[in-house]
Image (spheres, rainbow, N blue to C red):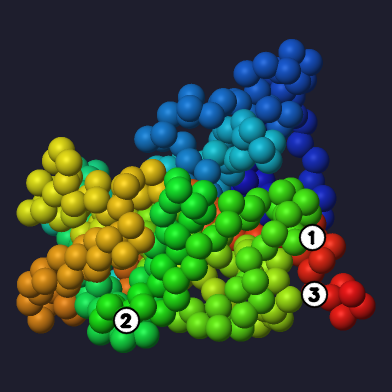
Amino acid sequence: MIDELGSVPAGTVVEFAARDLDIYPSPAVIAEAFSRREGRCVLGRPLYHEGEVPTGILATVPELKRMLLRPRLGQPPIATKKNARRGQDALYAIADAEPMPPATPQVERKRLLQRICAECQATSQLPFQPANDGKYYCEKHKRAADEREERQRIVDDSFRSALWSREILADPDTALVAMTWDRESQGYPFRVETVAGDVVLERVLPYVTGAPLLNATANDLPSWVNDPAGLVIADRRIIEAPSVHAVAAYRKLLGASDLDLRGINIAPRDEDNLARRYHRYANHPDRRHLFDGATRANTASVDWKRSLLTAAQVIEQIRQVLFEMARCPLSPDEVKRAKRLPRVPRSRASRRSVFRDVMLDVLEQNAGLGVRLYHPGASPLTPQE
Ligand SMILES: [Zn+2]
């Protein structure tokens, strides 16, 4: 029939009688399928639901691309895939598709890397999933690589904690802070020492640090609250006894004072959390025994508020925990590894948790603000009285 077209001038519209041609699917089949709305798409092509596509035979354009293929010029789709989000995707016969044209050498190299297992050199038509170390592995070796990476992360974190404690102990201005409960005076002894053991601050916080209580008892606040000497721990690096939130309580109390706290930072840094650091230190496979029974790990996170220790004894325990971590021997290579920034996980869950930490920090910083709002005797009123 194409031969008959030879005599027709170019650009002329030629009509065929549809009945002379074997069109599949025929217009009648298309119309019928359309009326039934099952098994075929509106264009009459076989319709597959997700998960039902014969994947070795048919593929969408993005799927072809992953196989380094593309539809040939003029290659028609022969089926349709139902897509929950965007409606429908055209499906092409994989056997009829042609290889993608060669890319730049860099892109070719990347394509190759993604399709060869870094462990056993197995190849795949589709790119492998990257492991947490950034390399590509076959399914079996990816799991092994991720486990290896996780073990290495635990070890590195442990050495990072050891380095951290050395850094803390080397800074003479670092403040070690503890607070306990004294039944006799019904107050919280609050103590700050340097690493070397010099007492920086010693106070007894009254039992009125809650915001709602403060209104009624503002006049009962101890006079030292207004003493600028209490700001001696401002802008220092602070290591506080775990689980008591001594510094937050102290800051809250200062928030009710006449002192101008704008721009003054009294808070431990998030990375200076002693219990978390010690937990990571003891998580090293060689140090798991530290978690057994009544151990140092418990010492590091014990609720000192309820214990019978004095604040000075608690600080001594903080110091001992820091020294224990700092004594951990580190080879130059381990130091190098520990100083390297940890690989940032890319999952959405971990990004959310980073965001949450920042928000908690902001809320913590604003704890003092809450007191100001509740307490009418805060700074603006004092001059008139
Ligand atoms: Zn492999």
User: Residue 18: image x %, image y %?
Assistant: 75, 29
Give the residue at x 71% y 66%. 256
Establish whether ligand 1 lies closer than 8 Å to the Cβ of label 2.
no
Q: Nearer the viewer, residue 272 or 222?
A: 222
Q: Circle 2 sits in a helix, a strand or a loop, which is it?
A: loop
Q: Position of residue 282 (x, y in %)?
A: 18, 54
In the rendered structure, the answer to whether residue 322 lies left or right of residue 256 reads left
**Dot 1 amino acid type:** His
Q: For mark 1, what is the residue?
A: 375
Most extreme residue toward the front is 184
Secondary element at image label 3? loop
Seen at 75% across and 61% down, the residue is 219
Q: Earlier in the sequence, mark 1 or mark 2?
A: 2
The kind of residue tagged 3 is Ser
Instruction: Give the spatial CA distance, label 1 vs label 3.
Output: 10 Å
Distance, label 2 to label 3, CA atoms, is: 32 Å
Residue 285's x, y, as percent?
Answer: 11, 52
Which residue is under mark 3? 379
Q: Please name whichever residue, 247 or 351, is drawn nearer the observer in this view of the structure.
A: 247
Three-letter code, disc 2: Asp
Task: For the N terminus, give its image quadrant.
Answer: top right
Residue under the image location 74 percent in, 60 percent down: 218
Residue designated by label 2: 198
Up/down of 82 relative to 114, above or below = above
Near-viewer residue (167 or 70):
167
